[in-house]
Image: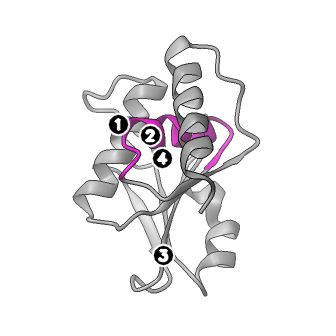
Amino acid sequence: MLAFDEAGSPANRPLILVHGWCCNRGHMKEIMAHFAARHHVIAVDLPGHGESSLGNVAPSFEGFAASVCSFVAERQLHQPVLVGHSMGGVISVVAAAREPALVAGVVNLDGAVPLAPSVRDAYRDWFTRINREGFR
């Protein structure tokens, strides 16, 4: 289970804030405060970061993306937008490609350049979907 903070009304569209490498959810507090008036904002600690234990999660883009997808599904969040900074941006793209029906979109803030083939495939799949369905 991911440690998290939340603000705003659960009646509004959820934004899931995903921090970067060697960070934690506290690094997203200013973004969280800004969007809380219009959204349900949730900042998570990725496995092995902040107050979330690594447990049996592989410390990889795929492992972290699976954790974010599980968090969204377990909390029954309806089509959140994933907002990721740096490594969190890559993880958000991988999560959206992994479970495209689960999320409404991705905002990638200074996302790192992915080198692993699986991450490049996730970007390709995501952009293919955008080209097919357009932006919402």
Upstream in sequence: badge 1 or badge 2: 1
Q: Which residue lies furthest to the right in this view?
A: 110
Mark 1 or mark 4: which is in front? 1
Q: Is mark 4 on a helix, strand or loop?
A: loop
Q: Above or below — where is 30 with respect to 61? A: below
| Tags 3 and 4 touching, CB below 8 Å | no
Residue at image coords 50%, 83%:
8
- Which residue is tagged 2? 95
Residue at image coords 45%, 23%:
60
- Which residue is tagged 1? 66
Upstream in sequence: badge 3 or badge 4: 3
Residue at image coords 59%, 47%:
19
Kindly identify the amino acid type of the residue bearing the numbered disc 3.
Arg
**Where, quadrant-wise, is the C terminus in this rendering?**
bottom right
Q: Give the range drawn in magenta.
A: 84-101
Direction from residue 113 to residue 123 in the image, left or right: left
- Which residue is tagged 4? 50
Asked whether residue 26 is drawn in magenta, I would say: no
Q: Is mark 3 on a helix, strand or loop?
A: loop
Direction from residue 21 to residue 2 in the image, left or right: left
Kindly identify the amino acid type of the residue bearing the numbered disc 1.
Ala
Q: Circle 1: is it few (<14), some (14-19), or many (20+) Cα within 10 Å?
A: many
Upstream in sequence: badge 2 or badge 3: 3
Marks 2 and 3 sit apart, C-alpha to C-alpha, by: 18 Å
Which of 123 and 48 lies nearest the eye of the viewer? 123
